[in-house]
Structure formats: structure tokens, C-alpha cells
Amino acid sequence: MKKIILIFITLLFLNLGLMAQSSATDKVRSKNFPKFPKIVNTNIPGAPVLGQPFHVNGKKQEIRVDKHGLAYPAFYDWNKDGKKDLLLGEFESGDTGSNIKVYLNEGSNRKPKFSGEYFYALDTKGDTITTHQW
């Protein structure tokens, strides 16, 4: 049975050179996170087994989404080093702005670690990947 891992990401309002893109608010740490209740799985044939949620954080700055705060996290080996990196889709209404933040994994697949520094995913032409919403 497949185990699904739940992650908690702080919600607030590729470059090929791997340059970090950040703002002044990225350096401000959040406080008083909510306590998540323990997940108790019910044994249902074919249903996924959920793991306990945990807060993913960066050692230099928080991992957070901007814009409307609607994050879509995924794990993918972005830089092809064998470790799953964290990709966060951000939602913004309009023609542009729904981008993908890439946080490179500095740990291992078993124990991922992130600095909190990120860059926006680029397409093969070097343009920031974005999509139209609404």
C-alpha cells in the first residue's frame, strides 16, 4: 500500500545559473504555527495510507508561497542529482504570475533538507513557466 506524505508549508501573502530569487519578506520567520491533529488511518482496501504531516522549513529562510497562498507542492528531481527537489506551484489570477518555485534538496530523499532559497522554473527558451488562470 502506498504511503502519502503530507507537508505543511508556510502560506503568506531554473534559473540555469541557480540564482536565488527572494524578497525582503523571505527573511521574516513566521511564529505560532497551528498544531495538527494526529492522523489515524482506517484500513480500507485500496485506500492510501497517510503519513503524519510535518512542517517543511529552510535553514536560511522559510519555505513559503506568495500570491494568493494557494500552494501546489510536488517532489521532482529538478536538477537531476538523484534527490527529489520541492516544487511549489503558485496561483495568481491573470495571464502571468502562476509560477513554479523550485527549492533544491540539499539532504537526501529519505531526509530532505532545504535552505529556503528558491528560483522560478524556466522553460527550454529561458522564459519563466507560467499559466493563465481564469
Image (tube, grey):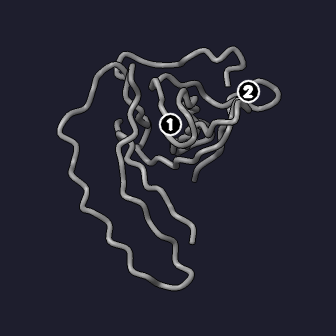
Amino acid identity at mark 1: Pro
Identify the residue at the far right of this view. Answer: 125
Identify the residue at the far bottom of this view. Answer: 45
Figure check: 28 above or below 123: above
Query: Residue 84: percent from the left, percent from the top?
Result: 62, 40
**Relative depth, front residue between 122 and 63:** 63
Q: Residue at x 41, y 43 (%)?
A: 68
Q: Find residue 127 and name its label.
A: 2
Q: Is residue 7 left or right of residue 127?
A: left
Spatial separation of the CA atoms under disc 2 and disc 1: 28 Å
Query: Residue 56: percent from the left, percent from the top?
Result: 40, 39
First in residue order: circle 2 vs circle 1: 1
Q: Residue at x 38, y 74 (%)?
A: 41
Identify the residue at the far left of this view. Answer: 32
**Relative depth, front residue between 12 and 59:** 59
Q: Residue at x 36, y 48 (%)?
A: 54
Q: Is residue 42 left or right of residue 81?
A: left
Amino acid identity at mark 2: Asp
Q: Residue at x 36, y 54 (%)?
A: 53
Q: Image quadrant of residue 37? A: bottom left
**Relative depth, front residue between 17 and 13:** 17
Check disc 2 and report its element: helix, strand or loop: loop
Kindly identify which residue carries mark 1.
Answer: 112
Query: Residue 95: percent from the left, percent from the top?
Result: 62, 40
